[in-house]
Amino acid sequence: MKDLRESAYRADDAAAVADLLNIAGEAGGGHVGHVAAEIDEVVASVVKDTAADTRLVTDGQGRLVAVALVLLPPVDGHRVSLVGAVHPDRRRAGLGRELLAWQLERAAARHAEVAPDTAWVGQVVAGAADTSVARLVEGFGFAVARYFLAMTAPTTPSPVAAPVESVLIMPYERDQEHEIHALHSLAFSDVWGYQERGFEIWTALTVRSGTFRPDLSRVAVVDDTIVGFLLAYQHGIPGTLYIGQVGTASAWRRQGVATLLLADVLGAAGRAGYTRAALDTDADSPTGAPGVYRQVGFDVDQRVVAYHRPI
């Protein structure tokens, strides 16, 4: 361990952090596809102070071998995300334990500083088959809080969806971002663990992200009112389009609106040269989302688990 050096995150570390998170994810049985732009946008938007709340560990050759980030909840939120990874060839040397202990310490300090009267939980997310992470977090008192599904579908042949009366599927337009943000807040309000983010941070992480694909994003419209939306992003896995958010107004759920959006985007993605699409969903979604995704060809690639413990 004497050859290791610690530093705080800087913008030019984004690509190395994305690569390490991808390597760790693959070692745990998944295919996560992080990209540099996504990492830098998340750090810029959600980390309070990079000098205090990020740690990068490099070896003697300058290779990044571990990372730990403390991502704060939004105002009135309750969940702090503890994002971290250790390169597979550096595991079992205590580095993961040291970094997770540090993350919990930083989370507790931020909690005392900004929301001492609000109950916070720390969250670690990993593949359900990643026994290395499971052992680590369980040793710190984390327990399984929720399961999610990482799903993929081929883009060709594109699925055919039955039309929904009065609903038109239209391309995303920049001037719709306020309306979509408002609908997103309503549509996701009953989703497990949802934390509402203000417009500026939400747009920075979604429709103004460097990975956003407006040309492959869609809205469902009824009489000039948006009743559903699908936002798509450039994935780090070649040939794969990532579907980040699919939302439907409560009055239009279970009528086929999400199916129409998905079918349209899968067809457009295929024509744009993508061979697959990927998304993540709550395994026990109250909206029945996994069943909707299966109808248009999505299958489960990996089960993902969110571990929680009080801060």
Image: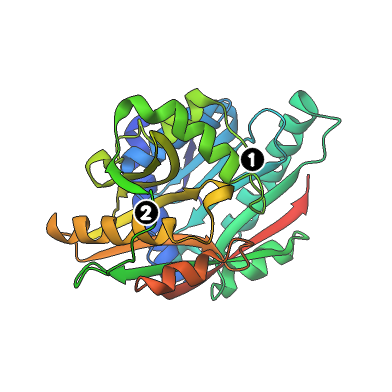
Secondary structure under tag 1 reads loop
Secondary structure under tag 2 reads strand
Query: Residue 248: percent from the left, percent from the top?
Result: 50, 49
The answer to whether residue 159 of the structure is visible from this angle is yes
Q: Are marks 1 and 2 in contact (CB under 8 Å)?
A: no
Q: Which mark is residue 9?
A: none
Q: What's the residue type where badge 1 is placed? A: Gln
**From the viewer's perspective, is 144 left or right of 118?**
left
Q: Which of marks 1 and 2 is nearer the N terminus?
A: 1
Q: Mark 2 = which residue?
A: 243
Q: What's the residue type where badge 2 is placed? A: Ile
Judge by depth and name the residue closer to the eye, 144 or 249. 249
Residue 24 position (above or below residue 54): below
Residue 85 position (above or below residue 116): below
Query: Residue 5: percent from the left, percent from the top?
Result: 46, 41
- Mark 2 crowdedness (10 Å alpha carbons): few <14, some 14-19, many ≥20: many
Judge by depth and name the residue closer to the eye, 227 or 268. 227
Name the residue at 61% across, 36% down: 196
**From the viewer's perspective, is 186 left or right of 24?**
right
Name the residue at 59% across, 29% down: 52
* Quarter of the C terminus within the rendering: top right
Q: Mark 1 = which residue?
A: 195
The answer to whether residue 43 of the structure is visible from this angle is no
Query: Residue 24: percent from the left, percent from the top?
Result: 44, 62
